[in-house]
């Protein structure tokens, strides 16, 4: 049985990417752990634990490592998601009770569309307005209350997703818990399923705990089925498949993908879907299938599904397209097709602006860079050089 991806895979968490970068820079400086340790005033064992993502370095140690390895602030930037864990929020926003719900809905719609393109920089505003709106729940009339609670739940969900995307998993957990609490107050089964599946379950799987991801996905599945929305059920089943793939459970992964395909093909909504379901369609299912195949150790078949996704995905979902282009490059590198991988990486860089890349996607770019450098293939050197400059410009 092929082992599931380890915790130190730099694609998974900010800590894992920091550890991989630290190891790469230490080796480039021709330093052993025992040689670097006295330079930064810690034990070599602690450095080993940091490199393998078992421990988080404190901010002062990050600064010392950055200086000792002449990283030019790069290690400081990579550590920001787990050293800068306090979410700064603006002061409460003053609104009339009747305007709270519409104002929050307009903000969610605007930020959600920007978030798909990784241009969302309004996380503090979303979090602050959600908390402000909570204070008005008891002050609006009963006819407005359910919609306001739904808006608040969606705002917390969106804030949680943005926190996860920047690498702040613990804060994202809190936001998702708040979203579910609000959704439960009004019995919004679709929102409960959405928060539990494509958000919390996916975050667990991506962050290195696929067992928890599967557990959360199956819990969300019951809510999705009760909601009656087959497209949502298909989405949650796909997230369960992603968890099984990470655990090398091929049969269960395939079962969930088949169920997702069946549910999606039978989805005929009598009224428009929630806007947050726009992100899941046949193209997205092909992308998730490709990721599953990659995790299960079938890179060639993964590339086929990922190419299917790339040709059919709406341009607006730039983050997903970028992630799956990088997954394609990962698959090609595993097959020794370095030049094809470099082409995929170049396409990904051509489509996005470095100053809009979120930390989670930046980790994927950096993981690819480390592998391109390690390949020793001179044919991809120019792509690696370009990628290094691109990553340096990422915020």
Image (cartoon, rainbow, N blue to C red):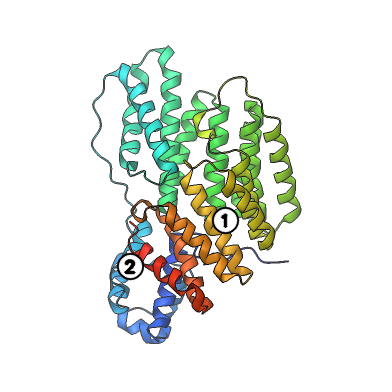
The image position of residue 7, as x and y in percent, is 54, 64
- Is 22 left or right of 124, judged from the image as shown? right
Helix, strand or loop at mark 1:
loop
Q: CA distance from mark 1 to mark 2?
A: 27 Å
The image position of residue 88, as x and y in percent, is 28, 46
The image position of residue 256, as x and y in percent, is 71, 45
Q: Quadrant of the N terminus?
A: bottom right
Which sits earlier in the primary sequence, circle 1 or circle 2? 2
For the residue pair 117 and 8, the one nearer the viewer reads as 117
Q: In the rendered image, is residue 10 in sight?
A: yes
Badge number at residue 316: none
Q: Residue at x 66, y 66 (%)?
A: 3
The picture quadrant where one finds residue 335 is bottom right
Q: Quadrant of the C terminus?
A: bottom left
Q: Badge 2 is on which residue?
A: 74
Label 2 crowding class (10 Å Cα cut-off): few <14, some 14-19, many 20+? some
- Is 35 left or right of 20, judged from the image as shown? left
Q: In the rendered image, is residue 50 in sight?
A: no
The picture quadrant where one finds residue 56 is bottom left
Badge number at residue 209: 1
């Amino acid at each position: 049985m092929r082992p599931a991806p380890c915790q130190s895979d730099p694609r998974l968490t900010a800590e894992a990417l920091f550890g991989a970068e630290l190891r790469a820079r230490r080796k480039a400086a021709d330093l052993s752990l025992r040689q670097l340790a006295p330079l930064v005033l810690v034990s070599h064992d602690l450095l080993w634990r940091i490199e393998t993502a078992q421990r988080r370095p404190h901010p002062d140690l990050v600064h010392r490592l950055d200086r000792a390895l002449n990283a030019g602030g790069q290690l400081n930037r990579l550590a920001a998601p787990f050293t800068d864990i306090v979410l700064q929020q603006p002061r409460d926003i003053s609104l009339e009770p009747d305007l709270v719900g519409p104002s929050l809905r307009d903000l969610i719609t605007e930020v959600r569309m920007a978030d798909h393109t990784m241009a969302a920089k309004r996380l503090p505003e979303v979090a602050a307005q959600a908390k402000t709106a909570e204070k008005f729940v008891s002050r609006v009339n009963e006819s407005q209350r359910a919609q306001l609670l739904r808006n608040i739940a969606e705002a917390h969900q969106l804030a949680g997703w943005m926190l996860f995307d920047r690498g702040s998993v613990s804060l994202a957990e809190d936001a998702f818990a708040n979203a579910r609490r609000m959704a439960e107050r009004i019995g919004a089964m679709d929102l409960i399923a959405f928060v539990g599946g494509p958000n919390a379950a996916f975050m667990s799987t991506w962050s290195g705990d696929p067992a928890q991801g599967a557990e959360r996905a199956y819990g969300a599945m019951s809510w999705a089925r009760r909601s009656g929305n087959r497209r949502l059920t298909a989405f949650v089943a796909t997230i369960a498949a992603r968890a099984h793939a990470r655990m090398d459970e091929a049969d269960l992964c395939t079962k969930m993908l088949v169920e997702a395909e069946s549910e999606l093909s039978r989805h005929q909504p009598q009224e428009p879907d929630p806007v947050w379901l726009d992100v899941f369609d046949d193209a997205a299912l092909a992308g998730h299938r490709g990721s599953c195949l990659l995790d299960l150790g079938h890179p060639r078949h993964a590339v086929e599904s990922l190419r299917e996704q790339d040709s059919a995905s709406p341009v607006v979902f730039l983050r997903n397209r970028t992630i799956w282009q990088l997954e394609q490059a990962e698959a090609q590198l595993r097959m020794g097709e370095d030049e094809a991988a470099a082409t995929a990486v170049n396409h990904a860089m051509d489509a996005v602006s470095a100053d809009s890349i979120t930390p989670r996607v930046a980790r994927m770019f950096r993981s690819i860079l480390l592998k391109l450098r390690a390949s020793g293939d001179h044919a991809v050197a120019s792509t690696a050089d370009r990628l290094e400059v691109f990553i340096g410009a990422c915020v």
